[in-house]
């Protein structure tokens, strides 16, 4: 597996009590993402030894933002096509609330799909649109 570390946050009041696992399994990665609630558990990071990582943030109201930073410093974010009633969505990521463009907010299955591809070989899932 390409990913060598799984990290997550877990906010208890003003303190992050999250953790990490070295050499996580696909099941551990999926569980961490599914447990995100946008309140106490707001961020999951999948990191590789070469410095590349995928971050999944949010979880509130079924909305997630997924970005990948490759070892060359290039950053890619999953985007959705379509017309949006709202131009921005408020997400809690890493314990901080912020507005994200609606096109960058994806559902749980999309976030899991992106994480699975990245965790296996560090790739950007080709069936998804990245910017």
Image: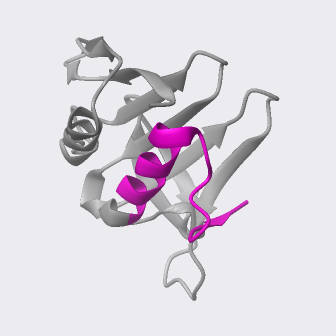
For the C terminus, the image quarter is bottom right
Q: Is residue 4 left or right of residue 82?
A: left
Q: Is residue 51 above or below residue 85?
A: above
Q: Is residue 20 above or below residue 119?
A: above
Q: Is residue 16 magenta?
A: no
Kindly identify the residue that appears in the image at 60 percent across and 81 percent down.
81
Which range of residues does the magenta coloring cover? 110-131
Q: Position of residue 78 (x, y in %)?
A: 59, 59
Residue 16 is drawn in which quadrant? top left
Q: Is residue 99 left or right of residue 112?
A: right
Q: Is residue 27 above or below residue 10?
A: below
Q: Is residue 113 left or right of residue 11?
A: right
Q: Position of residue 94 (x, y in %)?
A: 42, 29
Residue 53 is drawn in which quadrant? top right
Kindly identify the residue that appears in the image at 48 percent across and 54 percent down.
114
Q: Is residue 63 left or right of residue 72?
A: left
Q: Position of residue 122 (x, y in %)?
A: 59, 39
For the N terminus, the image quarter is top left
């Amino acid at each position: 597996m390409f990913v060598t570390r799984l990290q997550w946050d877990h906010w208890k009041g003003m303190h992050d009590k999250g953790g990490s696992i070295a050499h996580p399994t696909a099941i551990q990665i999926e569980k961490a993402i599914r447990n995100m609630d946008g309140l106490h558990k707001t961020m999951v990071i999948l990191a590789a030894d070469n410095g590349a990582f995928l971050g999944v943030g949010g979880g509130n109201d079924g909305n997630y933002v997924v970005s990948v930073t490759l070892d060359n410093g290039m950053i890619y974010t999953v985007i959705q096509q379509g017309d949006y009633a709202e131009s921005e969505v408020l997400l809690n990521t890493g314990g901080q609330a912020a507005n994200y463009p609606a096109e960058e907010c994806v559902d749980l299955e999309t976030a899991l799909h992106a994480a699975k591809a990245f965790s296996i070989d560090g790739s950007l899932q080709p069936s998804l649109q990245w910017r």
